[in-house]
Amino acid sequence: MPLPLTLAAGATPTPSLSTSPTPSPGLPDVSLDGVKAALMDACGNPPGFLCRTVYDSTHSDYLASGAQVFLGTPVTIILILLVATIIRSLLHRLIKRTTRHMASVTGNGGLLRGSLFGDSAILLERRRQRAETVGSLLRSVVSIVIYGIAFILVLGELGINLAPIVASAGVLGIAVGFGAQNLVKDFLSGIFMLLEDQYGVGDVVDVGGTISGTVEAVTFRMTRLRDVEGTVWYVRNGEITRIGNKSQQWARTVLDVPLDYDTDVARAKDVLLETTHTMWRDDQWAALIIEEPEVWGMESMTADGYTLRVAVKTLPLKQWDVARELRERLRLALVGAGINLGAVQRSLVMVDDDDDEPSPEEGDDEEEPGAPPQFGEDEIPRIDPPAQPGPVPSQGPGAGRGGSAT
């Protein structure tokens, strides 16, 4: 135990020796925690690769932070955009090859199904157009998704807090969704319409009501039709609740031939069947008629006569040409066979309006006693013939006053 020292008055105390090591003069105080803190101060948390490399090489906070700001962040953003562009290009190429393969494959199955009948060139062209439309849709979706992710990553590299942006985007999306319900409905209807191949450019469709015509253009929001009179109709895809397509796979010509009751049914059916088969064997019309024509028989009976129905299965959009030609041939065949077409019976009703009869008002009027008779403009009063001359009989004393009668 050390003895206590008594200091005299005015004596200076001597410092005690410390057992902790002191750094040598000229050497910095280096520790792991200090290096980590300095690195975070210069490059942030977590430190970037470029900033960390520059700091390890130069031990300068200024150079490390400058390299991170002017080189590290731009290089990272460029790499993000470059990778996004490469991925987008690869996916676009894959989509193009897939849609091209699906457009060239024959058959009736798959997403882009074809038709059983029809001109092969027309069907291939339609499949190609539909494949291009679906491919364009898929490429647009891929581009939006990839560049959207890249944009979020770039904002993160710039040190922007994404939570308020995501929250604001969610609120804005809800508001736009409520305000643009019809637009979203039209867009989704257009997508499903293209994927399901409900109709395409060149098809003759009936969208309900009085709107029917040929499809001229199809977009994700609207369909453009042109009717037989040349009027162009713009129909929103979301408003189409039902649609009838007259151009898919095959069509049918249906004719009702009116005949009199005096016409024998069996003989008329033979004439119709022979005429339709003759047209079917014709080289000009054999390519348009895909099945043997049929006479279905008596379709209806009225007071005027009965009708026989003829059905012919044709290529799409060729039913009207076949119907016009078939009407001409059937008419000539029936006239040649001595069969008359049914005539509509008409009833003639004649109304006799007698103007000479007096009206009820005139008949009710009674002539007053002593009034002179009234004659019409065309009525001549009956006048008695004059009396024959002869001797005048004596009238008594006053006869000479009146004179003789003439």
Image: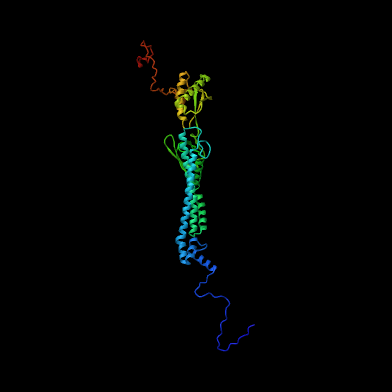
Q: In which quarter of the image is residue 402?
A: top left
Q: Which of 170 and 65 is in front in this view?
A: 65
Pick the residue in front: 254 or 298. Answer: 254
* Above or below, 201 relative to 265: below
User: In the drawing, does residue 388 fall left or right of residue 44?
Assistant: left
Q: Give the residue at x 47% y 50%.
A: 86
Quick check: 278 above or below 188? Answer: above
Q: Could you tell me residue 254's position as x and y percent?
A: 50, 28
Q: Is any part of residue 38 visible from this angle?
A: yes
Task: Pick whichever, 293 or 404, lies toward us.
Answer: 293
Residue 187 position within the rendered picture, expressed as x and y whole percent measured from the top left: 49, 45
Instruction: State the residue at coordinates (46%, 62%).
Output: 69
Residue furthest to the top in view is 391
Its colouring scheme is rainbow
Is 323 located above or below residue 215 in the figure?
above
Residue 313 at what x, y percent from top left? 50, 29
Can residue 361 be seen at all in this image of the molecule? no
- Against 26, residue 395 (above or below) is above
The picture places residue 85, in percent across and down from the top left corner, at 46, 51
Which corner quadrant holds the C terminus?
A: top left
Image quarter where the N terminus lies is bottom right
